[in-house]
Image: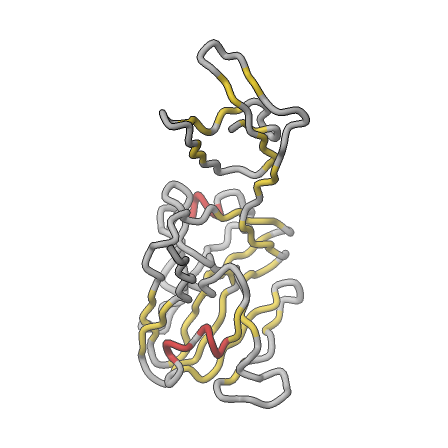
Amino acid sequence: MGAFQPEPGALIGNADADGELTFTWNEVGQFWPYAEIDTRTSMSQYPAPTFECTATSINLSPGWNFVSTPKKLKDGHCTVQQVFGDIDTGERSIRLYDAFASSWGGTGMAPGDDVKPLDGIWIYSVGPDEVYLILNAYPRDVPPTKILGAGWNAIGFSDTTEASANSTLMSVEAQWAYVIGFDAANQQYEPSIINNDQGEGAHNEGGNMRPGKGYWIYMTDSKELAGIRPPVKSQ
């Protein structure tokens, strides 16, 4: 398997003795398959079939952003430095909120700290920017969990497709009261989603939570929040 763009001819996969090809990549671009023997002679179909490789990303607005990763990140692409290192934060700290200490956790996240699913992260961006996330490719991983304390907690949304607050927070159904997102483009909070509100207004518990976003959640008691379990494929 070779990359057509951005590195023409970059080999990223090899076939085994049975001819089965397995390949991985950590960049976006356009790719095309070809066969190559030991003498470096290439054989490929013309016109070459191509496909696009895209990445999960988070768009940052100027000012404060409340973000999260929807899944566990791949080793080597999971620390604060590896994820946010290219973002101009205006020398502001990247911050987590410690619900059990009712504080912002000292001086902020260190460069070597892991970026974990279910964590709501506050990051300042001087200008518009984009963060690319390289997710763990192993779907059988156990979904993440996070202990939430009574009162306000900062959480992340744990899926790559949006889902209602009612279904997302099923594991803490008896304990959650409010969920509030942040509109980074306008630098203001979104309308709260209220548990058991089944009216037709903005606070309906069926309101969606979205990938890449962080949320404040108010809990009436401590409970473990479970990430959304990925669907099990039939064998």
Q: Viewed as shown, does residue 144 lie left or right of 1?
A: left
Taking depth in this image into account, of 43 and 81 the one nearest to the observer is 43
Up-down: is 55 above or below 107? above
Q: Is residue 189 left or right of residue 111?
A: right
Residue 152 percent coordinates (x, y) = 41, 77
Q: How is the image coloured?
A: secondary structure
Count every numbered label the image shows and give the total.
0
> In the figure, residue 227 lies in which quadrant?
bottom left
Where residue 192 appears, as percent x and y from the top left, is 55, 80
Q: Residue at x 49, y 70 (%)?
A: 215
Q: Is residue 71 left or right of residue 223?
A: right
- Measured from the top left, where is residue 186 in percent x and y? 66, 66
Q: Is residue 13 above or below residue 108?
A: above
Q: Is residue 196 above or below residue 50?
A: below
Name the residue at 51% across, 57% down: 123
The C terminus, quarter of image: bottom left
Q: Work out whether residue 82 or residue 48 is closer to the camera in this orientation and state it.
A: 48
Question: At 47% from the left edge and 29% from the top edge, which residue is drawn?
Answer: 12
- The answer to which quarter of the image holds residue 46 is top right
Q: Residue at x 60, y 74 (%)?
A: 190
Q: Residue furthest top?
A: 39
